[in-house]
Image (spheres, rainbow, N blue to C red):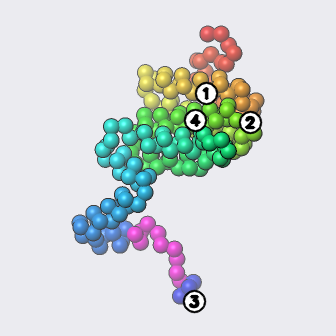
Amino acid sequence: MSKKENKRAPRWADVEIAINRFDKKQLMGLIGDLYRLSPANKDFFHTRFGLVEDPLVPYKEAIQAALTPELEDRPPVEIDRATDVVNMYSKAVDNPYGMTELMVFYVECGNRFALKYEGVDPRLFEALLEMAEYSIEAVQELPAEKQHPYRDRLHGVMKSASGVGSEYYSRFCDLYSSAFPDEAKPGAKG
């Protein structure tokens, strides 16, 4: 076999071995370099170590920018970027309330965009339904007394979605009604 065939892509285990050779000063230098590398890394460190009053702010700003572009030429919605933001937060800290808040906020932002513009990329609807499902699951895992604000917000999104598209609206209603059968269905009195 040639040397080329023996080469494999580096993996996390290889990185771990290299890091284990570092002394404290080298490790702090590496962490400092990572911190300065990007605003997202800074947000990660600030969130992980509880260094900011409201760690959700930069994540919400990034989601809003990705899902509700407000320029006249209507740039495309950046679904993957918004989803990555939620995932970055989940890696920074284990906070079910923060995760639930971000996921519900994602659905609200994307839904607002879909209500505002016609001819929205169908992938946005799929992404919103997927995030709505994750949001609903997250809400259900919270203590009952903490669920209501999130349920109310998701219910509001569901009701407003009736003006977007019948399939999106119908599927959102199915998700919500399956999770919270005790709630009045859209159009029902109560």
Say which quadrant the C terminus sits in.
Answer: top right
Instruction: Using the numbered discs, state the Cα–Cα distance from disc 3 to disc 2 in whole angstroms.
Output: 57 Å
The earlier-in-sequence mark between 1 and 3 is 3
Q: Count residues near mark 3 (Cα–Cα under 10 Å), then give few for <14, some for 14-19, many for 20+.
A: few
The mark that comes first in sequence, 3 or 4, is 3
- The residue pinned by badge 4 equals 109
Cα distance in 3D space between marks 4 and 1: 10 Å
Q: Residue at x 43, y 66 (%)?
A: 12
- The residue that disc 3 covers is 1
The residue where tag 1 is placed is 157
Give the CA distance from mark 1 to mark 3. Answer: 59 Å
N-terminal of the pair, mark 3 or mark 2, is 3
Instruction: Look at the numbered discs 4 and 1 and tell me whether their residues touch, using CB distance below 8 Å.
Output: no
Q: Using the rendered view, name the quadrant where residue 189 is placed.
A: top right
Q: Dot 1: within a 10 Å radius of its alpha carbon, few (fewer than 14), some, or many (20 or more) residues?
A: many
The residue pinned by badge 2 equals: 118
86 falls in the magenta region: no
